[in-house]
Amino acid sequence: NFVSSVVPPGEIGVKFDDIGALEDVKSALNELVILPMRRPELFSRGNLLRPCKGVLLFGPPGTGKTLLAKALATEAGANFISITGSTLTSKWFGDAEKLTKALFSFASRLAPVIIFVDEVDSLLGARGGAFEHEATRRMRNEFMAAWDGLRSKDSQRILILGATNRPFDLDDAVIRRLPRRIYVDLPDAENRKKILRIILAQENLEPGFDINKLAAATEGYSGSDLKNLCIAAAYRPVQELLEQEKQEPDSNGSPPLRSLNLDDFLQTK
Ligand code: ATP
């Protein structure tokens, strides 16, 4: 159940430094979320610096929204609860309303906490029309009501963080409750280089490996695409070694794995 998916800040295992590029996104999140959670006293005077109750991350698939959400919890020293539409509906169809209530009352005891709603469009998307299940509709209304009900004292320490690839599917009621919207863009060549540096940090690359060339050759790739490309490339020396062993079963001891070269990546693309 959702209670078992609470992760304390020290156990999330991702921090901002593990995310390449997205500097503007990190700095916006620092101001909007991390500071108010870490230093609530700085935001309690007057009316101008009210912490917000909701932030939306939107942008193409695979650009690191989930990764950012987790790292944000680490950086803010907050517990992390991740929910999707199916967490609240499928298993407990009918009970979704009760579960939503429980989620919010639980969260207020866990604060500081980030409730990450992945694919927020599927949980809180535009009203589903005549075919929408009654339970889904009730759950959504309950979710909005509980969200509105967060006392301003709590709102400093409970954040709803939504993520979506399809912001246009969100209805106005949800958009209004997510007043801060941050675009998480595909990386350009310079930023792909930063992401590749992180992904390849522990790999055995051949001397003189030119990461600029790889960044230039991966136009249009998301962070997730880059990760998948690197995994496929890293497999090539393994495959070669296995082939070699098959062809020379009698040789004693296998040679060491060779290092990765640019071709491994370009051939796998
Ligand atoms: P989706 O919208 O498809 O859910 P997403 O935007 O949430 O995708 P993630 O799930 O965070 O993307 O990214 C998938 C994987 O891609 C990450 O676990 C990570 O390995 C890699 N990745 C994506 N972006 C970055 C980045 N900026 N730096 C390092 N790794 C990244």
Image: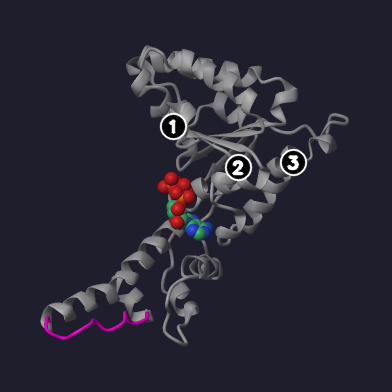
| Residue corresponding to mark 1 | 84
Examine the rendering and report whether any part of residue 60 can be seen: no
Q: Residue sitting at 70 percent across and 48 percent down? A: 30
Relative to 106, is 98 above or below? above
Image disc number at residue 9: 2
204, above or below 93, in the image: below
Quote the CA–CA distance across marks 3 and 1: 26 Å
Locate the C terminus by quadrant.
Answer: bottom left
Amino acid at the residue labelled 1: Thr
102, 217: nearer the viewer? 102
Mark 3–mark 1 CB contact (< 8 Å): no
Q: Which residue is mark 3?
A: 38
Task: Indicate the secondary structure of the residue bearing disc 2.
Answer: helix
Q: CA distance from mark 3 to mark 2?
A: 13 Å
How far, Cα to Cα, is label 1 from label 2? Answer: 20 Å
Q: Is residue 238 left or right of residue 184?
A: left
Q: Secondary structure at mark 3?
A: helix
Give the x, y percent position of residue 129: 38, 18
Q: Amino acid at mark 3?
A: Arg
Q: Is residue 185 magenta?
A: no
Q: Is residue 256 magenta?
A: yes
Crowding at dot 2, Cα within 10 Å, few <14 / some 14-19 / many 20+, comes out as many
**Disc number lying in front (3 or 1):** 3
Q: Give residue 157's position: percent from left, percent from top.
A: 69, 31
